[in-house]
């Protein structure tokens, strides 16, 4: 008989936690994106400025292509092109987002695995680069080249849409937590270099059972400012660059409505849209 110390005990298997079961792309969209509001703003702003309804949209750095899918849902005349360098996330979008569209709608969405600096997609009314994705370009030369490439994809009266954030809080390292129904979203401003403006941020997700997805997404950006972006868009050939600033209610809270503005309030944290006319 074996001594008690030599008995083989069954190995306990830890069951998967909520973090293991959750899909990071679903969590991201639930936390960060509102493609209905996004596409509504883009379409209504284009129609207001150009006097016609837009048809073709190119979503640069499209990720899961949720905005491209929402775009074609909005009108049967619309088509969308999504461009992203990451084949894995495009495959995810095909399986989980395009598959939700009706067959006729899917025919009007094209996803391209390519570099936004080099891709040739044909003319569109609108090019978008949202979720601060264009901040991946860290030099003036790189970003100007991207803006010039995007401009070349636009029809004569086309528009480019960008979002941007800033304020004194953007330069403060720390974590901001937002509770959702089944998880907590954590925005982690990890590091900032004031000499280069290199900016590293992470997204983490935490769950009620104590599990978490650490560094579910990591961004290595340059923290650009509105004057820099406006100058580079102009240098790239855009004829006019407008800024749309969020309005506030009587209590000083953001309303979610963005109007063209010549000056902005010096809030510690703000998000704005930049619209460039070809």
Image: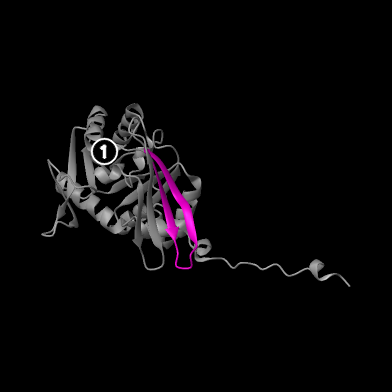
User: Residue 271 appears at what percent x and percent y?
Assistant: 24, 48
As drawn, is 252 to the left or to the right of 27? left
Asked which colour scheme the image uses, the reply is one colour
Q: Magenta segment, which residues?
A: 199-221
Question: In which quadrant of the rendered image does the C terminus lie?
Answer: top left
Percent x, y of residue 275: 22, 42
The rendered magenta stretch, by its main secondary structure, is classed as: strand
Q: Residues within 10 Å of mark 1 (few under 14, many from 20)?
A: some
Residue 277 in percent (x, y) is at: 21, 37
Q: Which residue is mark 1?
A: 155
Residue 102 visible in the shown view: no
Q: In the visual, does 86 lie left or right of 248?
A: right
For residue 103: magenta? no
204 and 92: which is toward the camera: 204
Residue 249 at least partly seen: yes
What residue lies at 26% left-to-right and 57% top-to-bottom? 37
* Left/right of residue 67 with respect to residue 8 in the rendered view: left
Residue depicted at 48% across the width and 56% down the height: 213
Image vertical order of residue 74 relative to residue 89, above or below: below
* Kind of element beneath mark 1: strand
Residue at the (25%, 43%) spot, across then down? 168
Residue 228: horizontal and vertical position, in percent? 25, 32
């Amino acid at each position: 008989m074996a001594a008690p110390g030599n008995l083989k005990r069954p190995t306990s298997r830890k069951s998967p936690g909520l973090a293991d079961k959750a899909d990071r792309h679903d969590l991201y969209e639930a936390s960060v994106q509102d493609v209905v509001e996004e596409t509504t703003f883009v379409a209504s702003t284009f129609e207001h400025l150009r006097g016609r309804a837009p048809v073709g949209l190119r979503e640069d750095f499209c990720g899961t292509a949720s905005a491209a899918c929402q775009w074609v849902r909005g009108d049967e005349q619309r088509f969308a092109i999504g461009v992203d360098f990451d084949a894995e996330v495009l495959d995810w979008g095909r399986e989980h987002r395009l598959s939700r569209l009706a067959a006729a709608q899917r025919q009007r969405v094209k996803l391209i695995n390519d570099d936004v600096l080099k891709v040739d997609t044909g003319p569109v009314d609108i090019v978008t680069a949202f979720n601060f994705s264009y901040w991946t370009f860290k030099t003036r030369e790189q970003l100007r080249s991207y803006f010039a490439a995007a401009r070349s994809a636009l029809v004569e009266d086309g528009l480019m849409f960008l979002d941007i954030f800033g304020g004194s809080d953007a330069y403060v390292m720390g974590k901001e937590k937002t509770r959702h129904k089944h998880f907590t979203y954590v925005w982690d401003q990890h590091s900032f270099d004031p000499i280069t403006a290199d900016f590293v941020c992470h997204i983490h997700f935490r769950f009620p059972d104590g599990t978490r997805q650490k560094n579910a997404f990591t961004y290595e950006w340059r923290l650009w400012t509105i004057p820099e972006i406006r100058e580079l868009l102009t240098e790239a050939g855009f004829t006019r660059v407008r800024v749309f600033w969020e309005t506030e209610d009587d209590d000083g809270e953001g309303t979610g409505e963005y109007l063209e503005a010549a000056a902005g309030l010096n809030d510690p944290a703000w998000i704005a849209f930049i619209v460039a006319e070809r």
